[in-house]
Image (cartoon, rainbow, N blue to C red):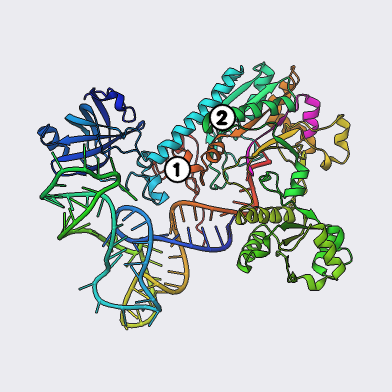
RNA sequence: GGAGACGUAGCUCAAUUGGUUAGAGCACUUGCCUGUCACGCAAGAGGUCGAGGGUUCGAGUCCCUUCGUCUUCGCCA
C-alpha cells in the first residue's frame, strides 16, 4: 500500500499543486457519471477526492466499485475547488484529483449508517461499538477525553506529582460497595477483590514518602448501574502529605481552572464557594447542591405547632419537619406540571406535595382551608411569597423532606429555566458528618470512609455525642453533580483504632482487615490527605452528555454486560476445577 | 428487589375498534447523470412484527410468560 503523505483533515489551499497520498474510509460518495466525488475520512478530518473519466479513466473505473466504509489509499493532486467551495468543511477550499486508487479493504454494508445524522438504538451501537466509535461525534468525544486527560497529566507533571500504580488484584473489604471478586488458583478457596478505589494503597504511599501522588486508575464497584454509573470507571486519584484542607482545595481549584481553560477555553473564577454539608442539606436538600439558582428550602416547622392541619402538626410533633420552597412566578405552572412535581416528590418518599398559588385575587390551594388566615399569612410571609408565586411544601422525616423537596427544587429550576444551561458553578461541600446511623440496624457507618479525620480537638470528643462529630472532608460539586471527593486522613494509630471501635469493627476484625494500615500508621505516617475525581463524570459534564457511556469506549449495559464481547460468559469446567469452584444452579423463581 | 418506557424491513418510525397482500423515509442493489458535498432521477430487492404460549372465525394490535435495551427508587463506605 501507499502510505499517506497527509491526513484527511490537513490539506488547505496552500497545498494546491502538491502530489499527495491519502489513506482513509469512504464516508460518502456522489456519482455524477463522468465525475465521482468521495468524502474520505480518518480521525483527523474529511477530504473530498474526485475521480474524472476524462483525466484518469482507470482510477475512475475502480472508483465505481467503491462502497461506503471501504478503506482506500489514493494518490492525486491537490486542486482548487474554484467556485464550488464548501465552507462547512475545514478542507472545503480544496479537493484531490485522483490519479491512482487502491482498495485496501472492503466493507460489508454496515448494520447502521456511520454518520451523525442517524439516530441508532443504543443496543445496536453497543453490539457494533467499533463502528459506533467510527462516527464523527463519538470520535470527537474521545479526542476531547484525550485532551482532558492530557491537561490533567500536564498539571500534575508541572506541579511535581508522581504517578504510581497500585494493584488491581487486591484484598476484599466488605465495607462500602459490593466487590468484584477474582478467585485465586494458587490459594484454593480464596479470592482477590478488584479495588473500589486505591484508598489504602495511596495512604501507604504517603507513609513511604511518595508525597504528591497521582494516578489515573480504573476502579470497580459491583452495584446497579445508572446513566452516570458504570461498574468499572476511572478515577483521578490524588494524595498529598504535610497538607491541610486549604492546600488541597487550592490545588483542586488550580487543577479545575487549568482543565476548563485548556479543554473549553473557559476562565473559571476563584475561589470556589465553600458550603458546609449541613447547610447544603438545610438550604438545598442535597449534599451536592445545584447552586446556579436560589430557591432555598425554608423551614416553617415552627409555624405548625397550633395549626388544625393534622398532617403537618403531627409530623412536627413527632420530630419531623415542614419545609417550603418558593417558586417565584410559579403560579403560572399548570395543574399537570404541579402533578408532575408531586410525582417526583413521591418517588423520593414524600406522601404528597402540598402547594399554595398566590394569585392576584387571593390564594389558591388545596390546603389553605385547614389554616387560619393569620397562620397562612405567617407561612406566606416566611416563604417571602408575593403575587405570582407558588409555594411548595415538603413534610415528613428530615431525610425525606430534604430528598423530595430538594428534587422538586431541581425540577422547578429546570422547568422554569432559572439558570443558564451553559453556565458552570463550582463549589466545595465541606465538613460532612463523620458517621451516620444505619436506619435498619442502628449501627454507625462512615459517611465518607473509615480513614477520614474527624474535626476534633481531642480524641476524647469521640466519646460524647458521636453523631454530631464532623469530618475534615470535602466534595467538589459542579452544577449539582458530585465530581470528586476526599478528606484529610487519620495518621495516628490510636485515632484509627478508635474509629474502628465506633464502627463496631472489633480489634481482631480490624487487625485482620486493615492491620497493615494500622501498622503503617505506627511507623511514622505523615499527616496526609487527598481526594479522587470521577474522570468519566467530569468528561460527561464538560461534554454535556446525557450518558457516561458516550465517553467510555466500551461501556457496559444496565445489566453490566458487554454486548460486543458478550462478557460475562460461562467458563469451562476445567477452568472452574483449577479454581476449586463449583457452580450451584440458582433456583428459577416461579 | 421495586416502578416505568420501548422492541415491526439493514436503520429510524407508521399501521384507526382485532379484519384484505404490514407501509414510509433513509440505507442497500441496478441503471442514468461532469460540480456534488446528508447530490439528484428511475427501477428493484428486502419482514420469524424480540421469543414462547393463550383468547378469537381472524392477533403486529388483547391476555399471560419470557428475553433484551433504556430511565429510575433502593443500592453506590
Give the image quarter of residue B46: bottom left
The number of numbered badges drawn on the structure is 2
> Who's the residue at 61% across and 16% down the image?
A160
Q: Position of residue A269 (x, y in %)?
A: 65, 32
Q: Would residue A317 be visible to someone looking at this image?
A: no
> Who's the residue at 17% across and 44% down the image?
A32
> Who's the residue at 80% across and 37% down the image?
A470
Gap between marks 2 and 1 measured at Cα: 40 Å
Q: Does the magenta run of residues contain A491? A: yes
Above/below status of A572 relative to A558: above
Which residue matches tag 2? A261
Q: Position of residue B50 (x, y in %)?
A: 36, 61
Give the crowd class for mark 1: few <14, some 14-19, many >=20 residues within 10 Å: few
Q: For numbered disc 1, what is the local secondary structure?
A: loop
Above/below status of A247 relative to A48: above
- Mark 2 belongs to chain: A
Question: In this image, A473 relative to A571: left or right?
Answer: right
Give the crowd class for mark 2: few <14, some 14-19, many >=20 residues within 10 Å: some
Q: Position of residue A276 (x, y in %)?
A: 77, 39
Q: For numbered disc 2, what is the local secondary structure?
A: helix
Q: Does the magenta run of residues contain A440? A: no
Nearer to us in this view, A518 or A54: A54
Nearer mark to the viewer, of 2 and 1: 2
Q: Which residues are magenta?
A: A480-499
> Who's the residue at 81% across and 72% down the image?
A370
Nearer to us in this view, B46 or A543: A543
Q: Earlier in the sequence, mark 2 or mark 1?
A: 2
Q: Position of residue A310 (x, y in %)?
A: 82, 69
Question: In this image, A248 relative to A384: left or right?
Answer: left
Give the image quarter of residue A35: top left
Which residue matches tag 1? A568
Amino acid at each position: 500500500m501507499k502510505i499517506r503523505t497527509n491526513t484527511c483533515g490537513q490539506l488547505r489551499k496552500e497545498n494546491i499543486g502538491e502530489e499527495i497520498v491519502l489513506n482513509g474510509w469512504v464516508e460518502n460518495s456522489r456519482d455524477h457519471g463522468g465525475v465521482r466525488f468521495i468524502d474520505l475520512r480518518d480521525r483527523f478530518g474529511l477530504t473530498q477526492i474526485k475521480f474524472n473519466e476524462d483525466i484518469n479513466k482507470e482510477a475512475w473505473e475502480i472508483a465505481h466499485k467503491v462502497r461506503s466504509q471501504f478503506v482506500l489509499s489514493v494518490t492525486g493532486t491537490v486542486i482548487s475547488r474554484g467556485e464550488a467551495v464548501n465552507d462547512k468543511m475545514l478542507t472545503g477550499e480544496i479537493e484531490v484529483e485522483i490519479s491512482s486508487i487502491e482498495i485496501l479493504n472492503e466493507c460489508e454494508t454496515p448494520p447502521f449508517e456511520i454518520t451523525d445524522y442517524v439516530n441508532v438504538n443504543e443496543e445496536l451501537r453497543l453490539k457494533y461499538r467499533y463502528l459506533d466509535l467510527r462516527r464523527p461525534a463519538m470520535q470527537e468525544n474521545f479526542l476531547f477525553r484525550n485532551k482532558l486527560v492530557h491537561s490533567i497529566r500536564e498539571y500534575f507533571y508541572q506541579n511535581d506529582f508522581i504517578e504510581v500504580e497500585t494493584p488491581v488484584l487486591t484484598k476484599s473489604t466488605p465495607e462500602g460497595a459490593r466487590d468484584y471478586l477474582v478467585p485465586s488458583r494458587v490459594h484454593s478457596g480464596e479470592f482477590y477483590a478488584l479495588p473500589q478505589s486505591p484508598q489504602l494503597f495511596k495512604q501507604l504511599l504517603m507513609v513511604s514518602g511518595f508525597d504528591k501522588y497521582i494516578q489515573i486508575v480504573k476502579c470497580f464497584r459491583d452495584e446497579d448501574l445508572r446513566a452516570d454509573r458504570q461498574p468499572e470507571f476511572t478515577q483521578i486519584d490524588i494524595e498529598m502529605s504535610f497538607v491541610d484542607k486549604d492546600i488541597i482545595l487550592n490545588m483542586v481549584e488550580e487543577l479545575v481552572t487549568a482543565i476548563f481553560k485548556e479543554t473549553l477555553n473557559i476562565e473559571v473564577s476563584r475561589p470556589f464557594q465553600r458550603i458546609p454539608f449541613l447547610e447544603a442539606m438545610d438550604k438545598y436538600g442535597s449534599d451536592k447542591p445545584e447552586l446556579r439558582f436560589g430557591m432555598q428550602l425554608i423551614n416553617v416547622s415552627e409555624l405548625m405547632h397550633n395549626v388544625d392541619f393534622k398532617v403537618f402538626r403531627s409530623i412536627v410533633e413527632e420530630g419531623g419537619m415542614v419545609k417550603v420552597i418558593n417558586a417565584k412566578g410559579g403560579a403560572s405552572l399548570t395543574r399537570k406540571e404541579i402533578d408532575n412535581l408531586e410525582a417526583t416528590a413521591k418517588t423520593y418518599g414524600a406522601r404528597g406535595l402540598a402547594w399554595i398559588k398566590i394569585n392576584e385575587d387571593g390564594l389558591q390551594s388545596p390546603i389553605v382551608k385547614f389554616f387560619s388566615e393569620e397562620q397562612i399569612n405567617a407561612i406566606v410571609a416566611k416563604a417571602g411569597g408575593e403575587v405570582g408565586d407558588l409555594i411548595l411544601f415538603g413534610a415528613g422525616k428530615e431525610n425525606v423532606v430534604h430528598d423530595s423537596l430538594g428534587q422538586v427544587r431541581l425540577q422547578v429550576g429546570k422547568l422554569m429555566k432559572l439558570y443558564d444551561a451553559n453556565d458552570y458553578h463550582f463549589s466545595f461541600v465541606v465538613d460532612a458528618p463523620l458517621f451516620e446511623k444505619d436506619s435498619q440496624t442502628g449501627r454507625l457507618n462512615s459517611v465518607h470512609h473509615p480513614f477520614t479525620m474527624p474535626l476534633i480537638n481531642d480524641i476524647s470528643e469521640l466519646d460524647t455525642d458521636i453523631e454530631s462529630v464532623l469530618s475534615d472532608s470535602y466534595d467538589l460539586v459542579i452544577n449539582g453533580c458530585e465530581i470528586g471527593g476526599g478528606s484529610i486522613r487519620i495518621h495516628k494509630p490510636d485515632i484509627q483504632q478508635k474509629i474502628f471501635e465506633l464502627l463496631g469493627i472489633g480489634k481482631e476484625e480490624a487487625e485482620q482487615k486493615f492491620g497493615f494500615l494500622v501498622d503503617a500508621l505506627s511507623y511514622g505516617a505523615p499527616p496526609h490527605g487527598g481526594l479522587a475525581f470521577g474522570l468519566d463524570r467530569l468528561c460527561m459534564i464538560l461534554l454535556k452528555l446525557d450518558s457516561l457511556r458516550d465517553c467510555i469506549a466500551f461501556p457496559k449495559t444496565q445489566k453490566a454486560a458487554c454486548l460486543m464481547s458478550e462478557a460475562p460468559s460461562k467458563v469451562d469446567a476445567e477452568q472452574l476445577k483449577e479454581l476449586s469452584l463449583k457452580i450451584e444452579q440458582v433456583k428459577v423463581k416461579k
